[in-house]
């Protein structure tokens, strides 16, 4: 499965990084930054209306290159001006053409909380995310044991990082709840065959107590998708491809927000 390949590439990348900057050093740097004030990414999702996490992503395994031109700072600025609540930045280099530098620069340029979208397989990446300026990290249940998720959540809490714990099915939602996730994201994309089904997050929403923040991820395209997700009481949506391919991101977000405001 693609996730196994990404995880293997990530492990190699982290070993190379550890040889340059040892764990103890990155950990010291992260901890000396303090835990900050509050959890801005969680706060961005904890609103009466659906929150929009807008993704900065050049490519993906399922779609290949999404855009030839990739002015990532301009894209992040457009998201901010269009009223995004948070920004997700792909930092995985091999399969998504992402970069840590994108995150560092975007964090400097916008006032929104930034999610580091990478494939966490090692605690090193949590400390690293903090030093890069991230407000949140992604923890994918398909990659991590429940006990490890629990340990990583404790590290995140100490660092003042929010964690979006990603699940795709009932078993993974159960694992995220058992681990103590405060934010659960349900991926509508099946990473085995890349099919997308928005009803996946609507169905799994019912398994998550309302005091836990819930994010619907992937394949969201239209105002009627947003209206459906709003009716299912999701707290936030994570949107990548639809916005990346759209020239007028402000107009597209306004159109999608229209779906968020539709009455039942
Ligand atoms: O999108 C992929 O091809 C993919 C493959 C393997 C692991 C993760 C993958 N996607 C990451 C994501 O979760 C999406 O970037 C995110 O949910 C936004 O999805 P979309 O709006 O469909 O771009």
Image (tube, grey):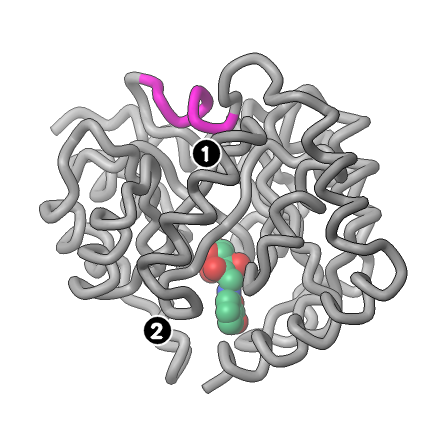
228 to the left or right of 88? left
Q: Are marks 1 and 2 in contact (CB under 8 Å)?
A: no
Which numbered disc, 1 or 2, marks the residue closer to the eye? 2
**Compared with residue 71, is residue 64 higher up or lower down, i.e. above or below?**
below
Q: Residue at x 42, y 48 (%)?
A: 151
**Compared with residue 153, is residue 33 higher up or lower down, i.e. above or below?**
above
Furthest residue to the right? 20
Question: What is the x, y in percent for residue 21?
Answer: 85, 54
Question: What is the x, y in percent for residue 19?
Answer: 85, 66
Q: Magenta segment, which residues? A: 41-47
Q: Residue at x 50, y 38 (%)?
A: 53
Q: Residue at x 74, y 26 (%)?
A: 32
Q: Secondary structure at mark 1?
A: strand
102 to the left or right of 242? right
In the image shown, does 16 or 98 lie closer to the viewer? 16
- The answer to which of marks 1 and 2 sits earlier in the sequence is 1
> Does the magenta run of residues contain 45?
yes
Res 190 label? 2
Q: Mark 2, residues whose alpha carbon is within 10 Å: few (<14), some, or many (≥20)? A: some
Majority secondary structure in the magenta region = helix
Question: What is the x, y in percent for residue 111?
Answer: 68, 20
| Residues at marks 1 and 2, CA–CA distance in whole angstroms | 22 Å
Which image quarter holds the N terminus? bottom left
Question: What is the x, y in percent for residue 142?
Answer: 37, 69
Residue under pointer 1: 52
150 to the left or right of 263? right
When asked about the image quadrant of residue 183, the answer is: top left
Q: Residue at x 55, y 27 (%)?
A: 160
Q: Mark 1, residues whose alpha carbon is within 10 Å: few (<14), some, or many (≥20)? A: many
């Amino acid at each position: 499965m693609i996730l196994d390949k990404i995880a293997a590439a990530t492990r190699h990348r982290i070993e190379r990084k550890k040889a340059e900057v040892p764990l103890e050093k990155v950990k010291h740097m992260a901890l000396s930054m303090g835990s900050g004030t509050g959890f801005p990414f969680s706060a961005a999702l904890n609103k009466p209306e659906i929150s929009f996490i807008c993704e900065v992503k050049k490519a993906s395994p399922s779609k290949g290159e999404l855009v030839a031109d990739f002015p990532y700072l301009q894209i992040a600025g457009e998201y901010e001006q269009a009223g995004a609540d948070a920004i997700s930045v792909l930092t995985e280099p091999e399969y998504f053409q992402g970069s840590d530098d994108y995150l560092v620069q975007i964090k400097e340029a916008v006032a929104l909380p930034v999610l580091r979208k990478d494939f966490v397989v090692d605690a090193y990446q949590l400390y690293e995310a903090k030093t890069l300026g991230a407000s949140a990290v992604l923890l994918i249940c398909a990659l991590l044991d429940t006990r490890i998720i629990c340990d990583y959540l404790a590290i995140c809490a100490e660092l003042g990082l929010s964690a979006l714990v990603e699940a795709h099915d009932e078993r993974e939602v159960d694992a995220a709840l058992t681990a103590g996730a405060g934010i659960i994201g349900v991926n509508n994309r099946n990473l085995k065959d890349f099919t997308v089904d928005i009803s996946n997050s609507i169905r799994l929403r019912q398994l998550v107590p309302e005091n836990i923040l819930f994010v619907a991820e992937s394949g969201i395209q239209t105002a009627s998708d947003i209206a459906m997700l709003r009716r299912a009481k999701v707290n936030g949506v994570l949107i990548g491809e639809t916005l990346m391919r759209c020239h007028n991101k402000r107009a597209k977000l306004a159109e999608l927000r229209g779906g968020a405001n539709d009455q039942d």
